[in-house]
């Protein structure tokens, strides 16, 4: 990558948590880093590309901490069904047929949607992950990728899948200028027997990588865990040693006070997926209690088959809204906290340093919103507008690792027309096979 | 209006409730009516304007059945506050200063946002309603407008406000080629004493108009009603004779079984406002029970100060999602029902005949969505995409009463740039006064 410099003039910058959460001024970017942000014009940056920020609001890129990108091929293929019917009659029969090419085009469709919608980092747990890594590398997005392993199979197959997961992590962790990192990811306590789970913990130790798994998404799986192993999922995973590794669990809908305390003690992050949890009727996570206990709560879309889009603005808004409605407290999850969950807490929960904040020294992963639109006026409080009024389609420009990847709503790194066509063809092919 | 004819070729049309909810084919419009919709090409329509529908999905225009358009001037002016602080320290002091011009520019901003976002009909309850009616007339939108009256004032002022409400209804009901209709609207049982409420019922009888009011939005007002009058709000309004008129109540969050039964018996509609109810932490309406009891449930955004946008796709999606999450039943409020709530049930609940469905003989209020976008692919089930994946910003074209008012995302009837500027100036003026 050749050296390049950018200066943004007269922009509005969101800095949640700061004394002045909406800063008006300047930001400079050199190579992959933010080098300056402030109200005063910086010293001249030679040969810098100048961006006029006067109609724009800049904010950290959104961080999607749980999903299955290739599942966008099944968006709208099954809705309003009980979980068992949805899985057994709709998702699993189709997913069984997924080839590497299906995963490539499904992931391309998702990455295209995410980049255009302001998501600059995503976590993906699926199969055929080499093909997802190709998409991540090509597109310029930041990605935390892992082979998600379901262990309900003979030991021989289990070991083969584990070897795949390890090989993938070895091959891709740190690649693409460091934009791609990896974690070790057994699918869930209810799909991986204890002795198999222990092997993942060992692999994570050996590779010095964090861990990710689905946990306590439905009441049924919590009850099943207690019946099978005499422990609820949190105590079960603690006992198997998972939390000796830095860990992120997805969902965490059904947690009691003691479990929240354990997660806080081990600094286990929770990826809150409000859209998917509502749509599948899994329940509503105890986010206000988790935050109060000091747990890092981030946001994820889950796969597009249970969401049904990858708009992180929507997840932010849902997180800010539903916990008010449920608790009866209109001050619950205020706008700045929802924005932090979608940005800084997101990066922290997937163990990325230097990502998620507009600050000198941080990675230049940021987005610009066109604020001169009816639904973002008047300009009372732009941070409020980002959380409560904006959507993915308001994103005008996107930069990742200092490189502009979306300009005036067009993705510069991917061939949108080809991806749209191939995604449709992939779905039609799956229907026919 | 000069006679005009349009034929749409090769479109996809949403017909929720029909055997084939996604019809592929043709639709013709002559003057203000749909004259044909079907799979086969119709007989030639002479001199018709031809629309190529091949990249588009057509659906009935969205019907927003509760709101306060001028409050968009206060979007983002107060968030994450308790209801009393929000009202007493933020909303009321600013609203007191609203002039007719403020209402005009606030309503213009809202109507612009709504039209561009696919809302073809809105209900508005506020003050300075002549100015809102001007906006409705100019913009081409369909509107149900009413002077909302708060009666916590001396009898003389009460009577003056009532006279205003009556005069407004007389002047505007049936105007703008019938696009503007009116209702009689006391603000709420907790802001209008019983004897004053009775006068509104009489006025509605005299003018032969339906009624609209806020009801049971918060638990506190329900308890206050019981303490003050010995009755919960539903029985209270029944006793005062309101339900002898065709009626729509907004919110209806806190209802017991008996109250739901009373509403069903009198065919009182409920405008469900999920976004606002969540944001103000009012609670979650018992929508599945209301629908089961046969109550017509429609959707409203409420004012943009408590939402904070007027995207009816979002309200549709919230309605489809939150009741699944709350009841634990993923089949609750399925996509076709959510779409009906936002269209046909919407029109029915505000007593508009011939609006809300794509069908020969119906009013030509319809919108077109660009479906060749990453988040709306693959084309598995377009009705699902409309409810679970789309947003206001996906709206490409809008027709109301047979007239195109939005083309390629641009409003043809309003001066967007002027409205954006004036709305910002109005807010700044309110801050200074």
Image (cartoon, coloured by chain):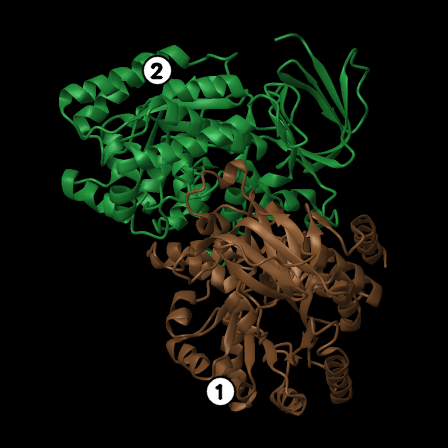
Chain colours: A green, B brown
Give the secondary structure at mark 1. Answer: loop
State if disc 2 and disc 1 touch (CB < 8 Å): no
**In the picture shown, does residue B102 fall above or below B222?**
above
Give the residue at mark 2. Answer: A168
**In the picture shown, does residue B375 fall above or below B297?**
above
Give the residue at mark 1. Answer: B230
Q: Quadrant of residue A171?
A: top left
**In the picture shown, does residue A136 fall above or below B163?**
above
Residue nearer the viewer, B380 or B256: B380
Q: Residue at x 41, y 59 (%)?
A: B323
Labels 1 and 2 share a subunit: no
**In the picture shown, does residue B324 fall above or below B258?**
above
Q: Residue at x 55, y 58 (%)?
A: B42
Question: In the image, residue B123 lies at what x, y percent?
Answer: 64, 69
Q: Residue at x 38, y 76 (%)?
A: B257
Q: Quadrant of residue B262?
A: bottom left
Q: What chain does mark 1 sit on?
A: B
**Quadrant of the image containing the C terminus of chain B:** bottom right
């Amino acid at each position: 990558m050749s050296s390049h410099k950018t200066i943004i003039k007269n922009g509005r910058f969101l800095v949640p948590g700061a004394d002045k959460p909406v800063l008006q001024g300047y930001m400079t970017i050199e190579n992959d880093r933010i080098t300056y942000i402030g109200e005063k014009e910086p010293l001249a940056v030679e040969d810098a590309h100048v961006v006029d920020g006067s109609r724009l609001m800049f904010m950290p890129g959104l961080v999607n901490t749980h999903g299955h990108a290739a599942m966008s091929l099944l968006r709208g293929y099954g809705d309003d069904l009980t979980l068992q019917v949805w899985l057994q009659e709709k998702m699993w029969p189709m997913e069984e047929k997924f080839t590497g090419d299906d995963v490539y085009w499904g992931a391309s469709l998702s990455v295209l949607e995410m980049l255009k919608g302001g998501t600059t980092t995503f976590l993906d747990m699926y199969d055929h992950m080499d093909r997802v890594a190709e998409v991540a590398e090509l597109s310029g997005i930041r990605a935390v990728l892992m082979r998600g392993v379901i262990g309900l199979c003979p030991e021989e197959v289990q070991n083969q899948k584990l070897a795949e997961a390890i090989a993938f992590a070895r091959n891709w962790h740190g690649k693409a200028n460091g934009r791609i990192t990896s974690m070790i990811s057994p699918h869930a306590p209810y799909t991986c027997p204890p002795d198999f789970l222990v092997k993942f913990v060992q692999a994570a130790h050996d590779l010095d990588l964090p861990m990710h798994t689905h946990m306590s998404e439905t009441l049924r799986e919590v009850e099943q865990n207690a019946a099978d192993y005499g422990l609820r999922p949190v105590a079960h995973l603690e006992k198997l040693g998972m939390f000796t590794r830095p860990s992120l669990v997805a969902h965490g809908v059904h947690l009691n006070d003691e479990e929240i305390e354990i997660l806080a003690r081990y600094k286990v992050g929770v990826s809150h997926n409000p859209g998917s949890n509502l749509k599948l009727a899994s329940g509503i996570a105890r986010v206000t209690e988790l935050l109060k206990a000091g747990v890092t709560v981030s946001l994820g879309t889950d796969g597009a088959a249970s969401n049904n889009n990858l708009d992180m603005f929507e997840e932010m808004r849902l997180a800010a809204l539903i916990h008010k409605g449920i608790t009866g407290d209109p001050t619950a999850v205020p706008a700045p906290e929802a924005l932090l969950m979608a940005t800084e807490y997101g990066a922290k929960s997937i163990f990325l340093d230097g990502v998620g904040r507009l600050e000198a020294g941080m990675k230049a992963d940021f987005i610009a919103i066109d604020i001169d639109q009816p639904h973002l006026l008047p300009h009372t409080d732009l941070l409020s507008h980002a959380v409560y009024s904006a959507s993915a389609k308001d994103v005008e420009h996107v930069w990742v690792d200092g490189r502009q990847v979306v300009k005036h709503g067009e993705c510069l790194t991917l061939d949108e027309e080809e991806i749209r066509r191939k995604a449709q063809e992939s779905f039609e092919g799956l229907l026919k096979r």
